[in-house]
Amino acid sequence: MKTVALYDDDSFATEFTAQVVDCQETDGKYKLVLDQTLFFPEQGGQTSDVGIIGEAKVYDVQIEDGVIYHLCDKSFEAGCKVVGTIDWHHRFGNMQQHTGEHIFTGLAHKLYGADNVGFHLSDNTVTLDLNIELSEEQVRLVERSANEVIGADVPVRAYYPDDATLRLIDYRSKKEIDGAVRLVEIDDVDICACCAPHVNSTGQVGMLKVLSYGKYKGGTRVYILCGLRALDDYNRRMNLLAKSYQQLNCPEDDLPDRIAGIMDENKQLKYKISQIKADILMNQIAGYPSELHDVTIYTEDLDAKTMRDGVNTLVERHDGLCAIFSGNDEDGYNFVIGSSSRDCGAIAAGLRELLGAKGGGSKQMAQGSVLATRSAIEQTL
Ligand SMILES: [Zn+2]
């Protein structure tokens, strides 16, 4: 026996009484079937209502072949009467998002011939997929028009037309529907086949904001938020912004320039530091007596170019193996080795074989990285 879907007729009702048809336990959860319910089950890309039935918490609702299953944390006796209450804050938020999606898609269809090929509504994300690519200008025009439709507060009606009437109506639908077609009509904006609860007029959506959009499967995926969830998101972003400009101690409009300035300054400082490090390395190299054959330097935080320059200078002054290892025992070392007399490619191959090093090179010079301690490297060399 199919469950009577009370949310179909009155999307603003929050409390109902019903009779328990069946209640089965699986893995400590109870699947409760009632003769009728206000709980909208997960379907058409929208997550379910949540709420309370009797003493039990309802955390998920599913539908199979017209039978609605409430997933609860308590069991029920078949035949008993229960009172159920849906979480209105959650439901109203879902309705604001869903009607908002119809307005946006309806306008995108009207203005640009776009068809909706996907929809997802969860507690904090709403995405809609259109089958054509929209430009920035087009997205912003649909967004603005949607908010004008919201401001005009036009009626939203859900109804089941008879077959003859249905044949005359040009409505949007994502798929072929078997059984009665329920239409959701927004005057002069959209008519769409839909099973979900909606607000009664567009003004109740409050506002619609496009958060982002991008190319998706040859069309466009649009992220929107409506009503109170849009307000929450606005406040979250304002907070982030305030933290940023307070931290940087500047007016919010100056943020982009301020950040660009800091990044530029950072780049210049990094360059200066690498120059100072290179100078220190060259001084260190100049301090080694030229009679030394082999010189290996262990250091930290040197870039590849400074290491190569250092090894080239060492090779000019010493005829054995010259090497620079930059790093530490914990994270490993980057290395450059050079020599006028020994085969650096073969030495790198040895490091690969014995210490699992990466990299290689020619007879004159080799470079790479190795995850090993200084003493293990010293023994291997
Ligand atoms: Zn819908």
Image (cartoon, helix red, strand yellow):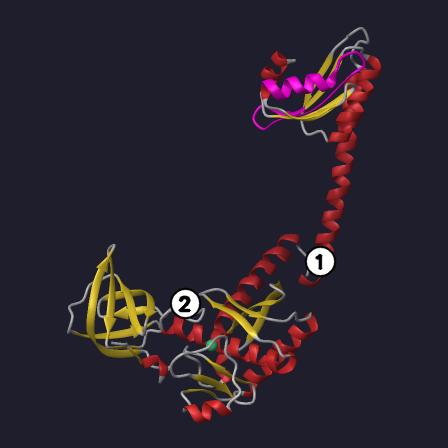
At horizontal 59% and vertical 20% (from top left) the residue drawn is 355
Which quadrant does the C terminus fall into? top right
Residue range corresponding to the magenta coloring: 326-354
Residue at the disc numbered 1: 256
Between 51 and 368, the one lying in front of the other is 368
Q: Where does the image place residue 153, in percent across and percent down from the top left?
A: 52, 87
Is residue 106 placed above or below 50 in the rendered structure?
below
Residue 222 picture quarter: bottom right
Residue ID for mark 2: 47
Label 2: few (<14), some or many (≥20) within 10 Å? some
Give left or right: position of 63 versus 76: right
Q: Is residue 331 magenta?
A: yes
Reading the chain from its start, which is encountered first: label 2 or label 1?
2
x and y percentages locating residue 183 in the rendered image = 45, 84
* Residue 191 place in picture, x, y as percent: 51, 85
Examine the image and state in which quarter residue 214 appears: bottom right
Residue 339: image location, x then y, percent: 78, 15
User: Which of the image's four quarters has the N terminus?
Assistant: bottom left
Q: Amino acid at mark 1?
A: Pro
334 falls in the magenta region: yes
Instruction: Residue type at mark 2: give it.
Output: Thr
Q: Residue furthest top?
A: 291
Q: Nearer the viewer, residue 253 or 18?
A: 18
Judge from the rendering whether residue 134 lies leftward or rightward of residue 31; answer left or right: right
